[in-house]
Amino acid sequence: MLTRCTGLTLSGSKCKRSAKCQWHKPKDNCAICMEEVGVRYPTTCPHVFHENCLVNWYVHSDVCPVCRSVQDTDKFILFKKSLDDVIREKYRDAIHTLEYENERLENENERLRRRVRV
């Protein structure tokens, strides 16, 4: 049995070509920018993205923008999480230093108030 193309023509009628028809071959379009994707960026779900589109999305989220499946094995997500850990550690040190300095200044302020009262 001869299989036919399942695509539609511009007029909306069924294509009469064989299944090897290249005119109606489904194209992979980026689910973010909707432009055709040449090289698929691998994700844990079947959705297709340009690498740059997905990296920009990953700045704000760790999930697929279409189905919301977690992309925790993605190399960019893993890199982002490692940077987050480093930044948290640095902020932790900075906060500790600021708390110490604030306490020192409050003590100094209290000492100066006592001196003025006397």
Image: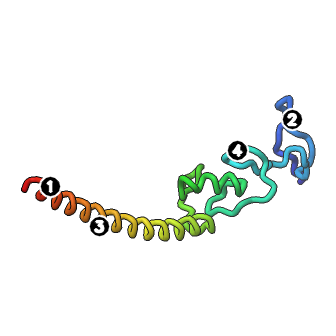
Query: What's the CA distance linking mark 4 and mark 1?
Result: 63 Å
Q: Earlier in the sequence, mark 3 or mark 1?
A: 3
- Amino acid of disc 4: Cys
Query: Are the residues flagged by discs 4 and 2 in contact, CB closer than 8 Å?
Result: no
Query: What's the CA distance linking mark 4 and mark 2?
Result: 25 Å
- Is 82 placed left or right of 56 in the picture? left
Name the image quarter holding the C terminus: bottom left
Q: Would you name the residue on which mark 1 appears?
A: 113
Name the image quarter holding the N terminus: bottom right
Q: Of circles 3 and 2, which is in front?
A: 3
Q: Earlier in the sequence, mark 4 or mark 1?
A: 4
Q: Residue at x 39, y 70 (%)?
A: 93
- Is 31 placed left or right of 101 in the picture? right
Q: Residue at x 64, y 57 (%)?
A: 55
Q: Of circles 2 and 1, which is in front?
A: 1
Q: Which of the two residues, 21 or 61, is positioned nearer the viewer here?
A: 61
- Amino acid of disc 3: Tyr
Q: Which of the two residues, 39 or 107, is positioned nearer the viewer here?
A: 107
Q: Would you name the residue on which mark 3 appears?
A: 100
Q: Would you name the residue on which mark 2 appears?
A: 9
- Amino acid of disc 2: Thr
- Does 113 sit above or below residue 96? above
Q: Residue furthest top?
A: 11
What is the secondary structure assignment of the residue under circle 3? helix
Q: Would you name the residue on which mark 4 appears?
A: 33
